[in-house]
Image (cartoon, rainbow, N blue to C red):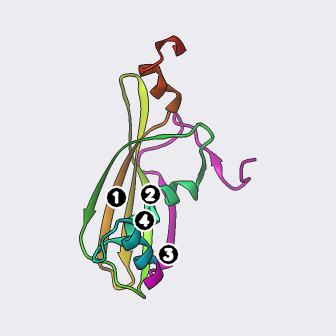
Amino acid sequence: MADPELKLFDYDKAEIGEELGSYEYTLTQEMVDAFRASVDDSDAQYPTLGVKHDATAFAMVYDDQIGTVNAGNEVEFFNPPIVGKKISVKGRIADKYLRRDKPYIVIEATATDEDGRLLEKLSTYQLKKPDELGKKWHPEQK
């Protein structure tokens, strides 16, 4: 059952520039250690990737009952996060478009720390009609 405070995602009603969820969290050493273990790199500098800022910001506003297919990600890193610092994340719908008659949205998340340092900008491209994916291999589904 949908959370009554979340809006049901409707591609046609979604607006470019629409603000999504904003939130804060404090980066802990445990978070850094878990990320480094998951990527098998004891010196990994950007554990914020493991938090999925974009998906979290979207899920704070929308109940997406249709689902999604991740069609790509772009991330820019500016400064490594510092353990113990509060990180603020702001999300928005940066774009939406049709490609080959299929609906896509671009979710953008920007993370800064409590000192105002820009940490990262993440853009995720999502196909908002995931049932289309299988048609490539199963044309009878058309």
The answer to which image quadrant residue 80 occupies is: bottom left
Q: Earlier in the sequence, mark 2 or mark 1?
A: 2
**Disc 4 marks which amino acid?**
Gly
Q: Residue 81 or 99: which is nearer the viewer?
A: 81
Q: Which residue is mark 2?
A: 54
Q: Depth-wise, is mark 4 or mark 3 nearer the camera?
A: 4
Query: Residue 75's spot in the image, x, y percent?
Result: 29, 58
Q: Depth-wise, is mark 2 or mark 4 nearer the camera?
A: 4
Identified at 53% across, 15% down, the residue is 141
Cα distance, mark 2 to mark 4? 11 Å
Q: Earlier in the sequence, mark 4 or mark 1?
A: 4
Magenta stretch, overall SS = loop
- Does the residue at mark 4 contact the one at mark 1 (Cβ under 8 Å)? no
Q: Which residue is mark 4?
A: 50
Identified at 46% across, 20% down, the residue is 135
Verify whether residue 10 appears in magenta.
yes
The answer to which image quadrant residue 42 occupies is: bottom left
Tell me the element at label 3: strand
- Does the residue at mark 4 contact the one at mark 3 (Cβ under 8 Å)? no
Q: Which residue is mark 1?
A: 122
Q: Is residue 56 left or right of residue 96?
A: right
Q: Earlier in the sequence, mark 1 or mark 3?
A: 3
Q: Earlier in the sequence, mark 2 or mark 3?
A: 3
